[in-house]
Amino acid sequence: MQAVRVDPNAPGHLKLTDAPDPVPLSSQALVDVKAISLNLGEVKRARRSEPGTLLGWDVAGVVAEKAADGSGPAVGTRVVGVMNTGAWAERAAIETAWMAPLPDSVSFEVASTLPVAGLTALYSLEQAGQLLGRRVLVTGASDGVGLYAIRLAKLSGATVTALVRREEARGVAEAAGADHVVVGENGKTAAAHAPYHCVLDSVGGPVLADALKMVARGGILVSYGVSAGEDALINAREFFITGRSRYYGLYLFTEFGRRPARDGLRVLADLVADGKLDVHIEARADLAGLGGLAERLFNREISGKAVVLVD
């Protein structure tokens, strides 16, 4: 099969090469890959990984070989799944607990955007509980997770404020349904609509420090990224005297111990099939063009999702 592996001398540090087919474990199904979605985290990882490493998280395709332990979908089933590595190839071995059947009305292209971005948004918002009539702040709101978070929060009945870094990103956040869109390099621009019952933060740094000041009593800030920096100087007293407020660190792959990926993927796929959830796909490429697409994503030239279509 063909696969995209780490190559420091190639665009995005990634190059299409020949590779052996994966050998699935008994709990894994072998899937013919039809579409792949890129995420900033794995694109960054490509720049610090050893040459020859096979990366990739998001995948949609067709089951070519059922799991040997009898779990999961049958051969020929359209599926969407997530991996901790190995999706950037023509075939992938995926844990059956990390995949879900795909309704016929949902394209592979759209389905491939659901795993990391969609599950991160879904599982983050679940930490806040009831959102009907409550205020939600989404930072980094023009990326894949942010846009899914806006849509899912609106479906839950929340009033959503979206924080974006560039004025050019305002339109995609508005199209996703944000009630308020604010532009800025820090979180202070979102203060006008505070306090928030739920804050979803993917930025870190000063934005995280500012956002913690805006959490309402009994509210929560869910942190799942640090695109602007890992260090944040916070006023601990100001946070704890709010009362019953929480800070939750969400790393998606550890969340699967709480709620299997297949559960969330079913929810998201059904929402798409019912016409209640859509996605902004801004860029596409074939497998040979994955490296160039990754370079664009790394340089923040893409809002929403970037998808690779596999023949």
Image (tube, grey):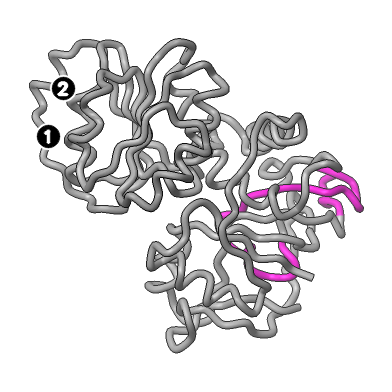
**Contact? badges 2 and 1 (CB < 8 Å):** yes
Q: Mark 2 points at which residue?
A: 239
- Badge 2 element: helix
Q: Mark 1 points at which residue?
A: 234
Q: Which of 155 and 240 is in front in this view?
A: 155
Is any part of residue 71 visible from this angle? no
- Amino acid found under the numbered disc labelled 1: Ile
Q: Position of residue 224 (x, y in %)?
A: 38, 41
Up-down: is 137 above or below 13? Answer: above
Please give left or right for residue 293 compared with residue 133 in the image: right
Please give left or right for residue 167 compared with residue 68 in the image: left
- Could you say which quadrant of the image residue 137 lies in? top left
Q: Which residue is drawn at 62% across and 44% down?
A: 114
Q: Which residues lie in the magenta part?
A: 66-92
- Amino acid found under the numbered disc labelled 2: Phe
Up-down: is 149 above or below 143? Answer: above
Up-down: is 51 above or below 219? Answer: below
Give the tally of numbered discs. Answer: 2
Is residue 87 rendered magenta in the image?
A: yes
How packed is label 1: few (under 14 Cα within 10 Å), some, or many (20 or more)? Answer: some
The C terminus appears in which quarter of the rendering? bottom right
